[in-house]
Image (spheres, rainbow, N blue to C red):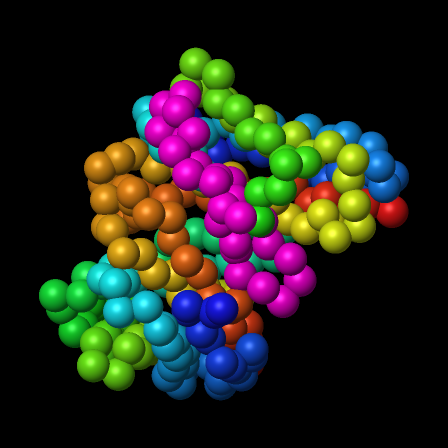
Amino acid sequence: DQQVKQNSPSLSVQEGRISILNCDYTNSMFDYFLWYKKYPAEGPTFLISISSIKDKNEDGRFTVFLNKSAKHLSLHIVPSQPGDSAVYFCAASADPSGNTPLVFGKGTRLSVIA
Amino acid sequence: DTGVSQDPRHKITKRGQNVTFRCDPISEHNRLYWYRQTLGQGPEFLTYFQNEAQLEKSRLLSDRFSAERPKGSFSTLEIQRTEQGDSAMYLCASSLAPRGNYGYTFGSGTRLTVV
């Protein structure tokens, strides 16, 4: 039972363009969402998060949008750079204090082509 | 502090053998998590500790798996009588509660191959 779904296994984008990575969730108790980035042979690293009380959070080139009614979030990267090529995981939690562990999606492999 | 350290980075073992992995969290972090990642999947939760107390275990953690965190510092994850299905990347993460999820820092993982 996949509670966090990333339906696109891979995405290719030209350098300088926008990358949009999507994530859907099924558990209505989730109220805190995070994106992690993973390079080969390394552990995932935290990228950006959003609480359910917001619909947008921005950090430099990275913006996360949350649509609670649709149970959908997306990560926008503008402009995309070759160094952004990695696997991106969407994660969710029902408790931002960490009392319930994060639930991860399967990931989307982003390739930014120079 | 060099972040979360995991040892070994790679482990190849024969089916039926026991293996033990170690995780050293960020020193001031009181929470420590173990996740498993198989090919094409995201990290799947196994268990977590707050200080030395093991607070939650996933149904994925069969009775062949045991985790400890003596004295609330480093943690070990042992797999007894390994099976080929145990082949995966085992990830450790730590955080400082109650800041919790925002402060999840992962190690580089231990890749287990059971032959």
In the rendered image of this protein, does residue B73 appear above or below residue A39?
above
Q: Is residue B74 visible?
A: yes
In the rendered image of this protein, does residue A32 appear above or below residue B48?
below
Q: Is residue A17 left or right of residue B10?
A: left
Q: Is residue A81 visible?
A: no
Residue A75 sits inside the magenta stretch:
no
Q: How many marks?
A: 0
Q: Position of residue A79 (x, y in %)?
A: 35, 78
Rendered image quadrant of residue B23: top right
Range of magenta residues: B34-59
What secondary structure prevails in the magenta region? strand
Residue at screen point 72% across, 48% down: B86
> Is A97 or B64 nearer to us in this picture?
B64
Query: Which residue reaches farthest top?
Result: B71
> Is B62 or A96 nearer to us in this picture?
B62
Q: Position of residue B24 (x, y in %)?
A: 50, 27
Residue at screen point 51% across, 81% down: A8
Residue at screen point 26% across, 69% down: A28
In the rendered image of this protein, does residue A75 appear above or below residue B109?
below
> Is A65 or A79 nearer to us in this picture?
A65
> Is A93 or B40 nearer to us in this picture?
A93
Q: Tell me the quarter of the image containing the N terminus of chain B.
A: top left
Q: Is residue A10 left or right of residue B12?
A: left
Residue B56 sits inside the magenta stretch:
yes
